[in-house]
Structure formats: structure tokens, C-alpha cells
Image (cartoon, grey):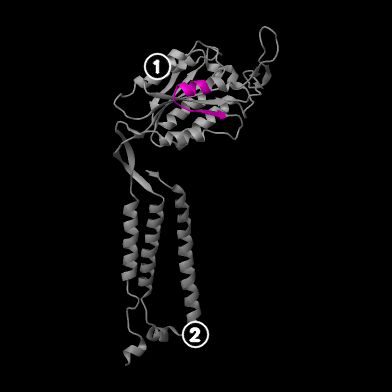
Amino acid sequence: MIWQAAHFLWLLLFIPLLIVAHIGLKKYWSTKIERYFKPELLKKLYKGPSAWMTNLRFTFSLAGLTCLIIALAGPKIGTEVREVQRRGVDVMIALDLSLSMKAEDVSPSRLDKAKYEISRLLERLKGDRVGLIVFTGEAWLQSPMTTDYSALRLFLNIIDTDQMPSSTTNFAEAMSTSIRAFEAIEKESKAAKVLLIISDGEDQGEPYGDELSEVVNKGISVYTLGIGTLEGGTIPMYDENKRLIGYKRDRASGTVVVSKLQPQTLSDIADKGNGDFYQIQRGSDGLDGFIQKIDQLEKGEFARQEYADFKNQYQYLTFAALLMWLFAWLIPHATKKSYYEQTT
């Protein structure tokens, strides 16, 4: 058994308090009445239910309240198979993992900011399929198209520049890998296909013109997100214990390398790819413009998915609560005539 909202179970702590209050209140009124009436006289004058009926009504009321509290907690017992029809857009994210993405001109770093914005994107998507490619001089499909955002977050959390064999950037490789990833999904889907390239724009790879043309011919729109500032930033180097040991230097001159955002490259890719170019130069900037664009694109129907889920059982407990309160209400409030009624 699992609970939909287990925090409501804390309300059960009030049940013992109500029992104690009920017993205490009965004792209080009994003591007070006995100060003014003798038991024989009280039996003649008093009109009302017997003690056991009062206790029975209270028991049913309390049982109903208990059932309602448990129902609010949303108990789920047993499993049921559900079928879900997915509708959305196919989005492939290509994330640059070159060494320059470690620059900290965007807080906390370009790569960390990119991962944070991707996580925000996943939170706001509704049924869209998302995949992840990581690239430097080479590109790898980290996660194929999926609607399982939790699994995608796991891949996202573990990626780092250190896992890549190359520290350069090659957009052509990212585009070629994205084409293969899109071809792997069903071709009959009418969903809009989107490639989002996230990078600082520094390109040390081969010309990407042919690959970009092929992407466009496949009906894929290319959007780009540039992360970094025009002033640029140094690239910190850390040891295995995450301690700063210096900054990346140019091999020829020995000077500290300053990596700068190259918006022209990314803007050119977006223009030719029938997409838009977005830019993050501050920690407060985000992907809101791209998310709004996604909402406007044509949604497609994906294959139906079946999954097992726990059955909600709150309705039975709610019914039991209502039944208990009905029984409490039906218990009569008077079981005998008063002395006045008996003598008239």
C-alpha cells in the first residue's frame, strides 16, 4: 500500500484527544448535575438517550471521522493497468561538453547553468518526447527520445566535460547524430521535430553546412541557445578533489585562455535551420522564450503506452465515513418520556 498524501495521517492524532475530551466532558456534566439533583429524581425528570446510546452515537461519529481522514491521505492498494495517449513535440537536445563550457562567466558555470535550464524545461513540458545528445569533437546519443523525464534527469546529472575524449566543439557531429536519433522513432508521427543546440558557440570542427541542410530537409527545426558573455571568462581547472589548481592556458603562448560567447555562429545555425537563437548571459536568464515556442508547434500523437499503477481506494473509505455518520444520526435522541409527559 502507498499513500497519495500521507501527511493527512497526522490528523489521526486528534482521535485520542477527542476520546479523552468526550470522557472528560461527560464526567464534568455528571458531577455538576449530581450537585443539584438526586439520581432518583433525575431519572424521572431527564428526557434523553441512555448512556450506551450516547456512547454508540459518539463511536459511529468518531469512526466516520477516522475513515474520512484516511480517505484524505489517499490509500492506494492493488494495481491497475492504464493506457495513456501521448501528444506533444519531439525535442532533441544537443549539449556542448567542450572544456570551454566550464567557464564561470555565467554563474555557477556555463555547463551547470545549461543543465539547470534543461531541468526547468523538463518540468514545464507536457507529454513531449525529449532526447539528449552530448558532443565535443565527437557526439554520442546519451538518451533516445523518451517521455520518461526522470530517467533523462539521471543522465543529465552525471554528464560532465571530463567524460569526453575531446575538448573541442564540432557542430557537424551533433547534427549527424541527431538525424540518426530522429530516424529511430516512428516516421508516421506528425509531431514537430526540434533540435536544440546548447553551446557557447566556439566551433573548432569541420564545416557543418551539409549536415545542417540535411537536418532541414528532414523537417527538423534547429534552435540554438548560447551560454556565456561577450566579455568571456577563464576556464578553471580542478583536481580529483574538486580543488582549484589553476586556469587553462594556451599551449603556445602560456597565457590564460579567455573563452567568449560566439553568438554569430549560433545565430547562423538557427537562421538556416528555420529556428530561433536564444542567449543566456546572466544567471537570471532562462529558456522561457524557447518553452513558449514549443507550445506553439504542432503536436503529434505518440504510441499508446500501458503502465501499471496502484488503485485509489479513497472512495470506499469516504462511503464508509458517510455510512457511519448516517448511523449516528439515526440513533434516537430520546428513548423515554419525561416525567411531565408521563403525568399528563
Give x and y (percent) for residue 88: 37, 34
**Front-most of residues 84 and 138:** 138
Q: Which residue appears at 47% of the width and 77% of the height?
A: 30
Which quadrant: the N terminus?
A: top left
Q: Against 213, is 27 above or below?
A: below
Mark 1 residue element:
helix
Q: Which residue appears at 37% of the width and 22% of the height?
A: 182
The range drawn in magenta is: 267-279
Quickly name the residue at label 2.
Answer: 36
Which quadrant: the C terminus?
A: bottom left
Chain-order first, disc 1 or disc 2? 2
**Front-most of residues 342 and 175:** 175
Q: Which residue appears at 52% of the width and 33% of the height?
A: 287
Question: Does any portion of residue 329 appear in the rendered image?
Answer: yes
Q: Against 8, is 180 above or below?
A: above
Give x and y (percent) for residue 102: 60, 21
Total numbered labels: 2
Q: Which amino acid does label 1 sit on?
A: Glu
**Front-most of residues 318 and 250:** 250
**Front-most of residues 199 and 340:** 199
Mark 2 residue element:
loop
How far is mark 1 from mark 2, CA to CA?
99 Å
Q: Residue 214 carries which label?
A: 1
Camera-nearest label, 1 or 2 = 1
Q: Residue 279 carries which label?
A: none
Q: What residue type is labelled 2?
A: Tyr
Residue 253 within the segment the image draws in magenta = no
Q: Is residue 339 left or right of residue 98?
A: left
